[in-house]
Image (cartoon, rainbow, N blue to C red):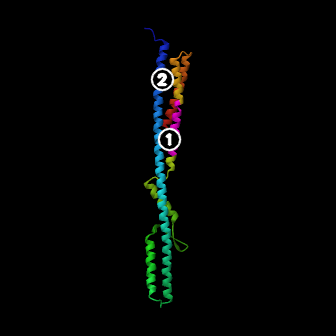
């Protein structure tokens, strides 16, 4: 039984290579679209994180302001009560309205204190003060433990995914060149068809290898 014509074997090989290259290129394009969707998803998460960061910052700023005002009012009313008491001790004959004024200042001081976050009430130069730096740090950490409030990691992931997707799409150039070489070798009467075929195989292998590395790693 005679062996098949070498030219026929080459045509069969080229047909297989064309189909294989087309399928591989389609798979790489599909993977590029998947990576692109990951980038879009990361963009959405970054937007949500940015909105949460803004809302969390506003809540923290409002709470810090309330505590600053509360500490100021607490210190003011407590000092007024102290002065009233000192005045009464010096002048025992102070009118009875003194007691009402003193009670009023004490009530206001207690009311102001009730609005404070006592864990952040500190003494500064002998006066009550609000430890705003520690409050902001802890409040942000507590918020971050519940939801993402930093869009930076998502933006970095989106950028990485988009770069990877673009590089995968760019590999279609190599697949297209390989298809061109295989098609020319199969359909035309060019000389040195094995050389065209070998060149196409090299391009296909290079594109496939780079694709595999970018997809797996």
Of 190 and 127, which appears nearest the observer?
190
Which residue shows up at 43% across the image and 81% down it? 103
Question: Looking at the picture, does residue 86 appear above or below residue 42?
Answer: below
Q: Are marks 1 and 2 in contact (CB under 8 Å)?
A: no
Whether residue 178 appears in this view of the structure is: yes
Which residue shows up at 47% across the image and 64% down it? 63
> Which residue position holds label 1?
161
Q: Residue furthest top?
A: 1
Which residues are the magenta region? 156-172
Which residue shows up at 45% across the image and 82% down it? 102
Residue 201 point in image, percent of width and height: 52, 24
Q: Overall secondary structure of the magenta stretch?
A: helix
Question: Looking at the picture, does residue 75 appear above or below residue 177?
Answer: below
Question: Looking at the picture, does residue 17 appear above or below residue 52?
Answer: above
Q: Residue furthest bottom?
A: 93
Of 115 and 5, which appears nearest the observer?
115
Which residue shows up at 47% across the image and 53% down it? 51
Mark 2 residue element: helix
Sort mark 1 into few (<14), some (14-19) or many (20+) by Cα contacts within 10 Å. many
> Which residue position holds label 2?
18
The CA distance from mark 1 to mark 2 is 29 Å
């Amino acid at each position: 039984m005679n062996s098949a014509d070498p030219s026929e074997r080459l045509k069969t090989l080229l047909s297989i290579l064309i189909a294989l290259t087309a399928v591989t290129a389609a798979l790489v394009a599909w993977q590029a679209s998947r990576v692109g969707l990951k980038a879009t998803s990361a963009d959405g998460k970054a937007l949500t994180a940015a909105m949460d960061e803004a809302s969390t910052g506003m809540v923290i700023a409002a709470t810090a302001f309330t505590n600053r005002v509360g500490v100021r009012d607490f210190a003011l009313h407590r000092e007024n009560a102290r002065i009233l008491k000192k005045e009464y001790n010096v002048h025992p004959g102070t009118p009875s309205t003194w007691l009402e004024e003193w009670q009023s200042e004490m009530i206001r001081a207690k009311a102001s204190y009730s609005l404070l976050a006592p864990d952040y009430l500190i003494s500064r130069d002998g006066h009550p003060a609000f430890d705003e730096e520690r409050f902001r740090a802890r409040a942000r950490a507590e918020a971050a433990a519940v939801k993402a409030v930093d869009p930076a990691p998502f933006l970095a992931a989106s950028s990485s995914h988009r770069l990877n997707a673009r590089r995968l799409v760019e590999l279609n150039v190599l697949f297209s060149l390989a298809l061109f070489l295989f098609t020319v070798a199969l359909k035309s009467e060019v000389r040195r068809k094995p050389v065209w075929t070998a060149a196409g195989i090299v391009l296909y292998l290079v594109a496939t290898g780079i694709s595999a590395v970018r997809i797996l790693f």
